[in-house]
Amino acid sequence: MEFTKTASRNSGFSTEETDDMVIKTLYGTSKLLYEKNMGFDKLISSVATKGGITEEGLKF
């Protein structure tokens, strides 16, 4: 919930919109991990863009 509240404040999207985006992102991530039997390192290298949000998130 804190993630979506912060995202909403910093993006201009409503809380409902950010909730929906996070839910869809988690769904897609878990689907890749499970259905493609993909590990986290492979997943990250497959979806991350140099200098993008995934890279930023991994800094924490």
Image (spheres, grey):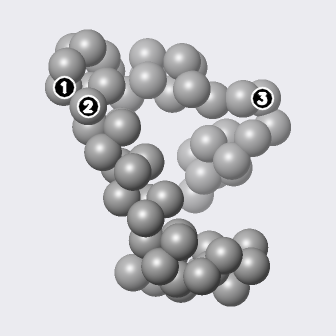
Q: Nearer the viewer, residue 29 or 16?
A: 16
User: Which of the two discs, 2 and 3, sits closer to the camera?
Assistant: 2
Q: Is residue 3 visible?
A: no
In the displayed structure, would residue 35 be above or below residue 3?
A: above
- Amino acid type, callout 3: Lys
Q: Residue at x 44, y 23 (%)?
A: 43
Pointer 2 and pointer 3: residues touching (CB < 8 Å)? no
Pointer 1 and pointer 2: residues touching (CB < 8 Å)? yes
In the displayed structure, would residue 22 be above or below residue 9?
A: above
Judge the density around disc 2: few (<14), some (14-19), many (≥20) Cα neighbours within 10 Å: few
- Amino acid type, callout 1: Tyr
Locate residue 23 relative to residue 6 in the image: left or right: left
Q: Residue at x 62, y 42 (%)?
A: 54
Pointer 3 and pointer 1: residues touching (CB < 8 Å)? no
Q: Is residue 8 visible?
A: yes
**Screen quadrant of the C terminus:** bottom right
Horizontal and vertical percent position of residue 20 = 43, 65
Mark 1 and mark 2: Cα distance apart in space: 5 Å
Locate residue 59 relative to residue 52 in the image: left or right: left
User: Which of the two discs, 3 and 1, sits closer to the camera?
Assistant: 1
Q: Which residue is denoted by mark 3 in the rendering?
A: 50
Q: Mark on residue 31?
A: 2
In the displayed structure, would residue 23 be above or below residue 41?
A: below
Helix, strand or loop status at disc 2: helix
- Amino acid type, callout 2: Lys
Judge the density around disc 1: few (<14), some (14-19), many (≥20) Cα neighbours within 10 Å: few
Horizontal and vertical percent position of residue 47 = 57, 26
Horizontal and vertical percent position of residue 21 = 49, 59
Q: Residue at x 72, y 29 (%)?
A: 49
Q: Which residue is denoted by mark 1 in the rendering?
A: 34
